[in-house]
Image: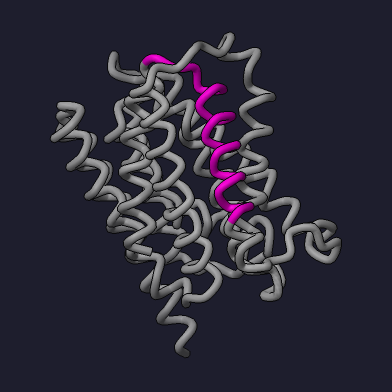
Amino acid sequence: MTLSMCGFAIEDLFLKILSETVPVSQILVYVGLSATFLMGFISIIKDIPILENNFIKNKFFIIRCIADMMGAVLIVTSISLLPLSTVSSILQALPLFITFGAVLIFKEIVGWRRWSAVFFGFLGVILILKPGFNSFHTSSLIVLLGVACLALRDLVTKNISKDVHSITVSLYAFILTTIGGILSVPFFGDFIPLTNFQWLVVFMITIFGCFSYFMLVLATRKGDISVISPFRYSRLIFAILLAMMVLGERPDKITLLGATIIVVAGYYTIWRERKLALK
């Protein structure tokens, strides 16, 4: 999970750099296609089945693919519009969204302590968004929608048959990313010719994206959620350091306070879930 989060932070950095000159839809299509070919090649070499009806017709598999596609479009869009440190901070609310989704979708029973943690976590999100202030960006709401999609993706992942290889899950995610990019073309304009440097960045996004995504799927499916979830927060550390060193971003004190509240609330939620599981 830590390797995955480090890789995603690096991928986000390259996405931010590329999105300054290339339409988001084009990034999604190019990265989605290149990642699809790479994962498809690996599937062929390892003789992993990718067209079996038993998982293509599985409702959880389909829901996961669609949620992942929407999450990719929304998160990449938010990265192009907002400071990387802001997007990364809001992404840390994912475990809180998962808790809320578990109640909403799977009717899981959540006590007042975890509800309190979710409430304080969303207060942290509000601090980062700063509604009513001049620094508030309406586009930051796109991040919240993206996080909701990613939460749905993670919630249904555990319900996918263990017989479906993690590489297959990753492959279909990138196929849907490509489709999401195609569907979003009307919103971002025509494609442009890429320079050699931009192609290099696309290649780096593909490599780090495939590696990180596979590590995430592997961790989510093989590991105990209560054990691996805290390591998601390492992404924030990696992202803020990269944003400061490479992009010259300087998160303000309110943003850092909001991020801290989110992390503390998320840690408490995970700790509480594990404690209840041991009873």
Look at 68% across and 57% down and name the residue there. Answer: 105
- Foreground pick, 144 / 131: 144
- Foreground pick, 34 / 126: 34
Q: How many marks?
A: 0
Question: On screen, 72 above or below 137?
Answer: below
Look at 72% across and 51% down and name the residue there. Answer: 63
Q: Quick check: 92 left or right of 53? A: left
Residue 30 painted magenta: yes
Residue 264 found in image quarter:
bottom left
Q: Where in the figure is residue 115, as x and y percent of width and height?
A: 46, 59
Q: Which residues are magenta?
A: 21-41
- Foreground pick, 270 / 183: 183
Look at 61% across and 45% down and name the residue there. Answer: 36
Look at 49% across and 17% down and name the residue there. Answer: 23
Question: On screen, 207 above or below 76?
Answer: below
Colouring scheme, one of rainbow, by chain, secondary structure, one colour: one colour
Q: Where in the figure is residue 25, as x and y percent of width and height?
A: 56, 22
| Residue at far bottom of view | 279
Q: Where in the figure is residue 67, as x and y percent of width and height?
A: 64, 45
- Foreground pick, 187 / 207: 207
- Secondary structure mostly seen in magenta is helix
Residue 113 found in image quarter:
bottom left
Quadrant housing the N terminus? bottom left
Q: Where in the figure is residue 127, as x and y percent of width and height?
A: 30, 35
Residue 28 found in image quarter:
top right
Question: On screen, 230 above or below 276?
Answer: above
Residue 172 painted magenta: no
